[in-house]
Image (cartoon, coloured by chain):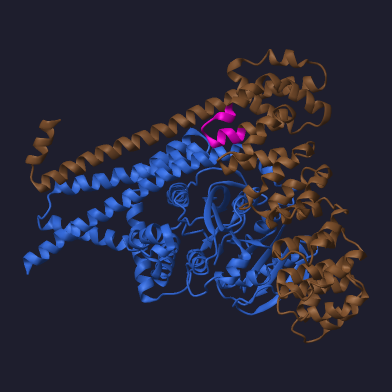
Amino acid sequence: MNQLMQAFAALDARDRLLVVLILASVLFALFSLSFAAAALLLRWRNLQKARRWSALEQEWEMRLLDLVSGDLAPDALRSHISDNDAMYFVDYLTRFAQRMRGAERRLVEEVATPYLPRIALQLRSRRAGTRARAIRTLSLLGLNEYGSLIIPALDDPSPIVAMTAARELCRRENPHFAPAVLTKLDRFQEWSRAYLSAMLAGIGPGAATFLRGTLANTRESAIVRAVAADALRTLNDIPSADIAAKLLGRVTHRDLVAAALRLVGQCGDARHTAAVRTLVRDPDELIRAQALSALATLGTREDLPSLQAALNDQSIWVASHAARALLANAGRAALDSLAASNHPRAELARAVLIEAE
Amino acid sequence: MVTALLWLLDFFNGLVLAYFVLLSSVYLITSIFAFAALQRYARRLKSFDVNDLIGSSAALPITLIAPAYNEEATCIDATRSLLALHYPDFEILVVNDGSRDATLERLTQAFDLVPTSRMRTADLPSAAIRGLYRSRVHRNLTVIDKENGGKADTLNAGLTYCRTPLFCAMDADSLLEPEALIRVVRPFLEDARTVAVGGIIRIVNGCEVTDGVVTKVRLPSSMLARFQVLEYLRAFLSGRMGWAALDATLIISGAFGLFRRSIVVAAGGFATDTVGEDMELVVRLHRYCRANKIPYRITFVPDPVAWTECPESIRVLGRQRDRWQRGLAEVLTRHKRMLFNPRYGRVGMLAYPYFFFLEMLGPVIEVAGYISFAIALALGRVNGLYVFAFLMVAFVLGMSLSLAAVALEELSFRRYPGVKSLLSLFGLSVTETLGYRQMSTYWRFRGLVSAVRGKKGWGAMTRKGFGNAPAATK
């Protein structure tokens, strides 16, 4: 090596450059060969895998159908699965299980049970993707047994693993996991609020009590309470309207006020109208819009003047909420005349009238 | 004097060499980042079921804005393919940009359009609106008919009537895969700061298309189109994926990108005075968000696919590349304050200088390099062996970068089935450097010259249409 370096140093600058270029050519040629070989090997391996898995999946599908129709016992089915194929079989089971409901689903879960301890070990993997996948598998095939292992994953350093855990714990059949998720909801504040509220609503009416507690809890962050309010609205939870109405006028965080207005608008009644009315002239356009929207369901003829005034709001969004509320409160005549006029908001009135057709 | 000229020649040859080393290093670095990012992404996909989102109220409503100019050949198929997308809550705004053919009539007939009114949600500049039509068959389809004003103007017109939090900007001839919206919306759900996301563009030439959906993926028969398949793989899987991994996305293709409406409207919509309106918007969003201290994220995801038709004639391809280079130059000179500006983080310090010096000015250096090499060779300043060795490095490096992109495709999505396709992509990686690259450099050089001269306009683009539709010239 030293001799080579000495020989290289003895060359003049042009010759050195030439040597560098030749070496670079060889290096990149080797790179090219490696990439091509990698692509070919990947293709070959994938084709082999696809062929083998396709054959195995066909066989497993038949056996699983025998299982759910009662012609094959879980033990008998497992006896056909070689140890080498076990993890892939579990992967297939997760897909198959999603097509099943009730007793059939439980049968599939029973088949998976002996394999799940191996999956649980993957929760300790260094790879976040592997941990997330293990959580999903355990949740789909053994949530009741492995739920206690999934809950700590809400504190996983990887946000994706933590979110996978939250999502899996929010399945309809397991409302008892709701408090665990709600206490960690702060962690997911960077996620879309629509996603979080839909995820919580996915638990079903069983989660309503916990969600109401979160909404009323002044120690929770405003964002978490807003998410809880939106989840309660998705669940159409009538009792939560009282809690939301009490928040109006007491809290100032715009997202929480807007979520409370949406909840009151959908689940509230005449008792809550007064609280909503106080906000139709709020300086914040988001709050004005949501208050007007709530009046579409809670308002009366008494609100017609303020709704008509709101048609001239500087924000087109607020005006559009006002127009819809007007239509819902027997204000069609006002909207018709606006639509027929040269008023700057005539186009909006026409659009809302067409929407209602 | 002669000595000074010869010194200059040597210096320039050194500069070309430095440019070449730098460019290759950037390509290699982005490919390495892309490799790691694709692996991470593939593992993440395994813990996420796209069907979770279908039917979920979590799916943020989206408006697809599809500009249409003289699209009578493809507008019905393209609109049908949009209507068939799998997404719980979306509407389609087809914006007819003053077509001179029967685009509007075809749409009216196919989708039973009737005049309607619609609320303007933004005040963006665009050519005069002639009429608004809604479909009586599909409640989520609206057609806006306007005077001709170009693509950016047309997108602004669509944005003016957009009432959803997100909108998807696309080309009229883009075919989105059925799950494309579900996949592209993910970053918006995972990070509420997200303002724009780009998806991957693949070439539809040669593929089988049924009812607006690509049903069989094949390489095109035309060599020119095949080279573009390879180019797109390199640009998206190595380039955009790598830059996204570095959190420095500067381009989202105009053929398919999802944006947060409120931020785009606040930033002023699409710029109508450039042919690079897609890149211009992304660069402006970086500036707008940083200037207004808005936390934001702009990224790229590799699995939502939009299929697009690529030119198969040298003339049309040359025009397209000329326009792309012109757009790039217009955008980069307009926002030159971002160059090496630490205020813009990695975008200002890495991505912008790369695009400015290597992508925008690269063709000048390359063309001048070919000439100065030839002069140096003729004057005996370099010997033939040196030139051969240099060209050999350029050749094998270009080949290895292309093969790296093919390997990334094989590692991730494997959209081109059959060993024959793979071997064909290998062959293209070898032959691309012998002719196609030089042509491409020439077109880009020409584009830069056009930009300096202040040339405007898009130029005509001939499309064959999907399936058996007749050819159309735009």
The answer to whether B27 appears left or right of A17 in the picture is right
Question: Which residue sits at x=65%, y=72%?
Answer: B160
Q: State the residue lying farthest toward the front.
A: A219
Q: Quadrant of the N terminus of chain B?
A: bottom left
Q: How many marks?
A: 0
Query: Residue B24's spot in the image, x, y percent?
Result: 32, 49
Frontmost residue, A244 versus A6: A244
Residue B59 makes an appearance in the image? no
In the displayed image of the protein, which residue is found farthest to the bottom? A342
Q: Which chain is brown?
A: A
Q: Quadrant of the C terminus of chain B?
A: bottom right
| Residue B387 visible in the current orientation | yes
x%, y% of residue B446? 35, 66
Image point (41%, 57%), residue name: B346
Quarter of the rendering containing residue B329: bottom left
Give B264 or B308, whichever is nearer the viewer. B264
Height in image: A59 above or below B189?
A: above
Residue at horizontal 64 percent and vertical 80 percent from the top: B128
Residue B8 falls left or right of residue B74? left
- Answer above or below: position of B177 versus B343: above
Is A161 part of what is drawn in magenta?
no
> Which region shows up in magenta?
A122-133
Residue B433: where, in percent of width, then height? 33, 48
Chain B appears what colour?
A: blue
Q: Residue at x 43, y 68 (%)?
A: B331
Majority SS type along the magenta span: helix
Q: Position of residue B411 (x, y in %)?
A: 48, 37
